[in-house]
Amino acid sequence: MAQGERWSEVLFGPGVDAPVEPPTGSGGITGRLSAAAGERPSRDEEAIADEIARDEASGTGQPEVRGAHAAPTAEEIPANAAVEAVRSRTPRPSAKTLPDDELFFGHKACAGCGGSLAVRAALKVLGPHAVCALPAGCMSAVGFNFPQLCFSNNAMITPFAATAAVLSGIEAGLRARGKKPEDCTVVGFAGDGGTADIGLQALSGAIDRNDDILYICYDNEAYMNTGIQKSSLTPFGAKTTTTPAGRHAHGCLTQKKNLFEIVAAHGIPYAATASIGYLPDFLAKVQKAAGIRGTKYIHVMAPCPTGWGCDVDETVELAKDVVDCGLWYLAEYEGPAVSGRPGGKFTINRDIRSFSSVADYLRRQGRFRALTDDEVSAVEAGRDEKWKAMRRDWR
């Protein structure tokens, strides 16, 4: 992309007004690479390529992911050994290594919004060349307020059901026009309803095609943007406007959909669960996903004080507590092309041997106020069965 050429002109043709391309050198942590943009690498490319080949042969390198229906071919996306080498050696994201540049700021999210924290942190890892797509939902509602766009990246709103399909189109268009930089990640940010309900068909199709996109679901466990309605990721017992808590029914009567394993069942190259309460783990998974070609999915728990009935300064603490009490888990799935195993490989990233109190976690939130002690015990028993199955099967 020529200096000063506009992203909107690349995507939509000449004459479309939009901010110019972010300046070279202001990249994020995943090797948003000025070296790849023109500076000669400090090491000989042929030597680096030989080193990568040795790593892959020994099982320590980062394999290139190709599914049966992957759109790009090797000729369309030539290997860049220098870029891949720099990426593989990029330090693990942390407060010390993240750039100071803010790529998502000035938004109108509620105080304590977990979703906005997830988007802000992920973009710091992906850098300014990431291209974002968001459906109707909290982050599009608070991030696209005319005349103020709260994304420094190129970003657009999609139809509610079409997040993954739009991501596929953006990636294919940039690649077809030869305008996709090596450090460009096409990323979607969608809520639980926009992912597990209305957006599931498009996500499934993108995984089947193995399009080179990253899909991040920020899960606040209800349709918060439209008034706190139940989604299929709303947990048992949670009060919403469509699952009220009354004398005969104490909130949501169904269990939270197991979307992580549904996605993994597709044989996706990479999928992971995360929580903003364990931010280094989330950042590391975003970085890892950015280095894998093919479809990637990250499901991050992102509490909503408005819908959960908690104080605005409890967001991160609750996001940590839901993991510590075992009602959410930190895990990864690597598909056959990445893991080298038929059927893929599951990994528990945080295997908790002594859980914190489920009752304490639930009682801190107004949405669970109507639950009886017997119902809390049932939730705890369900947790124990889930962890028993994971420890048995994910080895």
Image (spheres, helix red, strand yellow):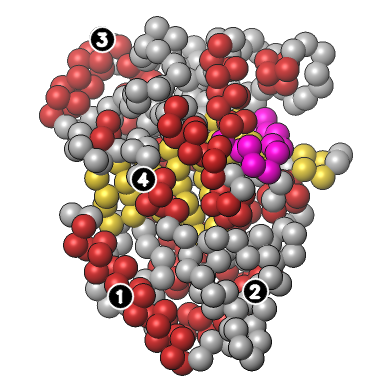
Residue bearing mark 2: 243
> Residue 25, position in %: x, y?
55, 25
Categorize mark 2 by other alpha carbons within 10 Å: few (<14), some (14-19), many (20+): some
Magenta stretch in the rendered image: 153-164
Q: Residue at point 33% right, 49% down?
A: 332
Residue bearing mark 4: 264
Provide the secondary structure element on which disc 3 rests. Answer: helix
Asked if labels 1 and 2 touch by Cβ distance under 8 angstroms, the answer is no
As displayed, is residue 248 above or below residue 392? below
Label located before the other in sequence (2 or 4): 2
Label 2, label 4: how many angstroms apart (C-alpha)?
29 Å
Asked if labels 4 and 1 touch by Cβ distance under 8 angstroms, the answer is no
Categorize mark 1 by other alpha carbons within 10 Å: few (<14), some (14-19), many (20+): some
Asked if labels 2 and 3 touch by Cβ distance under 8 angstroms, the answer is no
Res 118 visible: no
Categorize mark 4 by other alpha carbons within 10 Å: few (<14), some (14-19), many (20+): many
> Residue 232, position in %: x, y?
55, 60
Q: Residue at point 46% right, 86% down?
A: 375
- Quadrant housing residue 208: top left
Q: Quadrant of the C terminus?
A: bottom left
> Residue 372, position in %: x, y?
51, 91
Label 3, label 2: how many angstroms apart (C-alpha)?
61 Å
Provide the secondary structure element on which disc 1 rests. Answer: helix
Res 256 visible: yes
- Quadrant housing residue 335: top left
Q: Is residue 52 magenta?
A: no
Residue bearing mark 3: 46
Label located before the other in sequence (4 or 3): 3
Q: Is residue 337 left or right of residue 214?
A: left
Q: Residue at point 49% right, 32% down?
A: 206
